[in-house]
Image: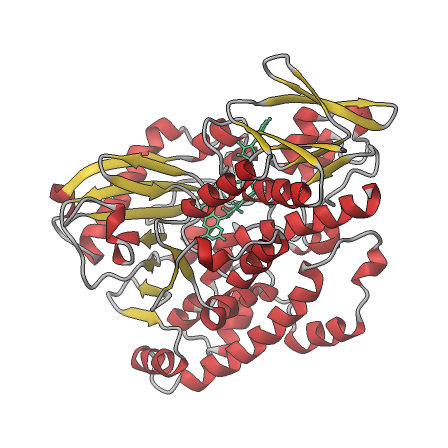
Amino acid sequence: MTKAVVIGAGLGGLATALRLRHAGFEVVVLEKQARFGGRSNIIVENGFRADTGPTILVMKDVLENFYRSIGEDLHSRLEFVRLEPNYRLYFHDGSQLDLHNTMAELADAVDRIAPGSSPRVFRFLGDAATKYELAMEFVTRNYRHITDLVNPKAIGRLLRTRAYQNLYAQVSRFFAGDDKLSKAFSFHSMFLGLSPFEAPAMYSLITYADLALGMWFPRGGIYRLVEDLVQLAEERGVWLRANAPVAEIGIERGRVTGVRLASGEWEPAEIVVSNADLPYTYRHLIPPAWRRSYPDQRLERMRYACSGYILFLGVNKTYPTLPHQSIYFAQDYRANLEAIFRSYSIPEDPSFHLNHPTATDARLAPPSHSLLYVLAPMPNLRGNRIDWSAAAPIVRDRLLNTLERILDPDIRQHIVWERDYRPTDWQRDINAVYGTAFGSLAHDFFQSSYFRPHNKSYEVRGLYFVGQGTYPGIGIPMVIISAGLVTERILEEWL
Ligand SMILES: Cc1cc2nc3c(=O)[nH]c(=O)nc-3n(C[C@H](O)[C@H](O)[C@H](O)COP(=O)(O)OP(=O)(O)OC[C@H]3O[C@@H](n4cnc5c(N)ncnc54)[C@H](O)[C@@H]3O)c2cc1C
């Protein structure tokens, strides 16, 4: 039986292990951390169960297809709740907008905040739907040659939707320059670690996917998905090892021979699939002689996504009218994003994503308590300009000041449990390059589709990559697709 080692048990690594096992390979997964899941992890303390990474699932059909591909039914294993509204948006002037997923309610809400604007929402969503269809042609395929990008139907859609333009500028044109609606329909690129002021307009496809296809929460939290994949892997004979950091990929005469663990142990294998951050894998696990196409200088030149600061709060009261997800926009939104992406400094008034999972599943906290997760995008660690031990209390204070203003003036008195997670934690815990949160490589044009690092090494036979660092990219659906694509390659080349 051909043996494959998967380095890292993020969602992409776990899905690849299951797919390869299903196809008849012997599979060993080696994970650095004590717990599986990578960026999708969890804290269980004092009766609170908090997801530490992803909180919501979009494009659920991707997960359904993956489960089907290994002979399982997603819905008989996990229970999903569709969010409504998707988000509540808090603007600095005190106004709010709920992004409903039923179009009539969305139109009403938009008309309340900007009278007469609802027809613009439908025009915008129609255009975003075309971008979604366009993107899917490039998301669900392996790349070999640049000619794989040539697709006359797609080029037509690209030109028609001007998906290459700037995201914020284009959305703003759809909404006749209305500042609130422009923010409301463009902030989604932040979940790829990209500023809407710098992202291509193509990424309005995420707004479409959220609104049209729904946002889903598995009861018990997103970590239930990791637990289920681990259980399936164990049942099917994948050998999963935690606390097993890999120090080097063994290569002889252009072929993978196995991996050496930090403990010195040797694990032989014909195939190695790295789910660790791709730039980290190239720089730290592959000897320079075997990565001439990815020398350090090239890795340095790449653009990296942003990081984040998360404040977890257990609160001894409930907020019955607060929905599952909210977004707070800083007064000076542009300055906020410039601090994150340009000057690499702590924003004065951080925008943030407020997650309130106990709105959907009260069992994630003790009775009559709430769990809040405040995620503020932050600069990554490139250039090391921020001392996070000094910065964290400042950011915490700024976030709590805003929560006092928009949610509860007494919130500080009600906090009974608290934790935080910083850019330096991602770097330390999972070898995230520059402490990047959502994924390592930014999704600009020259780091997407064919131009994103490929999921196989062209220099070493048997060496592959999976997860957010290769194509299609960042986010749960993308890394699950990535697992399908790398498995397709391996089956083509090894069976
Ligand atoms: C705060 C936050 C919020 C997010 N929100 C969402 C969301 O709501 N919805 C969504 O779809 N996506 C979201 N994402 C993005 C999503 O979580 C990631 O893109 C995805 O989980 C990445 O999966 P991956 O397969 O690339 O593996 P990763 O999660 O990056 O895992 C890589 C694994 O490799 C391991 N590893 C590294 N080096 C070694 C080594 N030397 N030896 C052994 N193991 C090693 C690491 O420990 C880690 O377990 C969020 C991410 C974050 C951080």
- How is this picture coloured? secondary structure
Residue 75 location in percent, x, y?
46, 59
Point 57% across, 23% down: residue: 245
Q: Quadrant of residue 130?
A: bottom right
Point 68% across, 53% down: residue: 448
Note whether residue 287 is visible: no
Q: Quadrant of residue 251?
A: top right
Point 40% across, 83% down: residue: 117
Residue 454 location in percent, x, y?
74, 45
Quadrant where the C terminus sits is: top right
Q: Is residue 324 left or right of residue 134?
A: left
Note whether residue 217 is visible: yes
Residue 433 location in percent, x, y?
57, 34
Point 13% across, 44% down: residue: 414
Quadrant where the N terminus sits is: top right
Q: Is residue 440 left or right of residue 179?
A: right
Which residue is more in the foreground, 321 or 244? 244
In the rendered view, would you say 192 is above or below 426? below
Which residue is more in the foreground, 2 or 152? 2
Looking at this rendering, what residue extends furthest in the top direction?
Answer: 264
Residue 81 location in percent, x, y?
37, 62
In the rendered view, would you say 174 is above or below 388? below
Q: Is residue 299 left or right of residue 315?
A: right
Which residue is more in the foreground, 194 or 337? 194
